[in-house]
Image: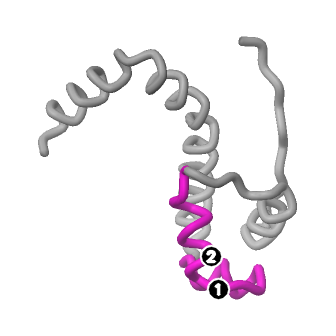
Amino acid sequence: MTDLSCKSFKEIALSDPETKAEYNRLAPMWELRKKMIALRIEKGLTQEQIAEKMGTKKSNISRLEANGDSFPTYKTLEKYAAALDCRIRIEFEHI
């Protein structure tokens, strides 16, 4: 599938109001997951290394970074951040 066909598919899918609403609802979580992965890679750590630091299994980190259907708890996010020597900052913005 080319980038163009993916873009066209997205445009078609988002023309449906229900699909667009769900996409918008999940967008912040996907953004968070992209940030988590980018930070992990920036730190030069593997999922396995993060899992070890968090006291969990690699498969849990894989799901945490990839599963858009579930939302991690704040405690899990804190552990992930600590494994990266980071802290969490939450902001509110006007919509």
Q: Which mark is residue 57?
A: 1
Q: Residue at x 57, y 61 (%)?
A: 65
Few, some or many C-alpha atoms within 10 Å of disc 2 (few <14, some 14-19, many ≥20)?
Answer: few
Q: Residue at x 71, y 12 (%)?
A: 95
Whether 63 is drawn above or below 24: the answer is below
The residue that disc 2 covers is 60
* Amino acid type, callout 1: Lys
Helix, strand or loop at label 1? It is loop
Magenta part of the protein: which range? Answer: 46-68
Quadrant that contains the N terminus: top left
Helix, strand or loop at label 2? It is helix
Do the residues bearing badges 1 and 2 touch, measured as CB atoms within 8 Å?
yes
* Amino acid type, callout 2: Asn
Who is closer to the viewer here, 70 or 43? 70
Residue 63 is a magenta residue: yes
Quarter location, residue 15:
top left
Q: Position of residue 55 (x, y in %)?
A: 77, 86
Few, some or many C-alpha atoms within 10 Å of disc 1 (few <14, some 14-19, many ≥20)?
Answer: some
Name the dominant secondary structure of the magenta segment.
helix
Q: Position of residue 19 (x, y in %)?
A: 44, 26
